[in-house]
Image: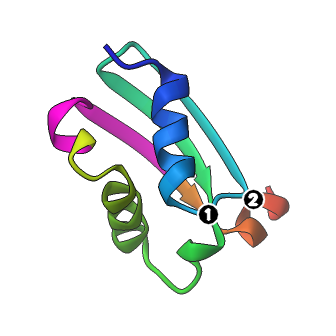
């Protein structure tokens, strides 16, 4: 089973992020991801960026990932 820290590392290794928080139980995870790469993209496109960063792990190791994706500007405005 994966730990939230492993999922965080997978995301950070493949996506330039300003902030990443991941919680979960080994199969189901919740994440908050802040990246400049989300600028100009809608939520679906932002999530696709994260799915690409996770690659095959999304199909093989991670059963479910709920995420909130934000640009650095959106994160600062919170």
Q: Which residue is mark 2?
A: 75
Residue 69 point in image, percent of width and height = 53, 57
> Gap in Å between the C-alphas at discs 1 and 2?
15 Å
Decide: is 68 above or below 63. Answer: below
Q: Residue at x 82, y 63 (%)?
A: 77
Numbered disc in front, either 1 or 2: 1
Q: Quadrant of the N terminus?
A: top left
| 16, 33: nearer the viewer | 16
State the mark number for residue 16.
Answer: 1
Residue 65 point in image, percent of width and height = 34, 38
Left-right relation of 75 to 37: right
**Colouring used for the render:** rainbow
Q: Quadrant of the C terminus?
A: bottom right
Q: Please identify the quarter of the rendering in which residue 73 is found.
A: bottom right
Residue 31 point in image, percent of width and height = 51, 39
Range of residues picked out in magenta:
58-68
Residue furthest out toward the left:
59
Q: Is residue 41 magenta?
A: no
Task: Decide if residue 7 is in sight here.
Answer: yes
Decide: is 35 above or below 41. Answer: above
Neighbourhood count class around disc 1 (C-alpha, 10 Å): few under 14, some 14–19, many 20 upward: few
Left-right relation of 55 to 12: left
Q: Residue at x 36, y 73 (%)?
A: 45
């Amino acid at each position: 089973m994966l730990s939230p820290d492993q999922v965080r590392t997978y995301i950070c290794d493949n996506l330039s992020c300003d902030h990443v928080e991941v919680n979960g139980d080994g199969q189901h995870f919740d994440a908050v991801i802040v990246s400049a790469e989300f600028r100009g993209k809608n939520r679906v496109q932002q999530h696709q960026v994260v799915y690409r960063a996770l690659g095959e792990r999304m199909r093989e190791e991670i059963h479910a990932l709920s995420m909130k994706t934000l640009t650095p500007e959106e994160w600062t405005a919170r």
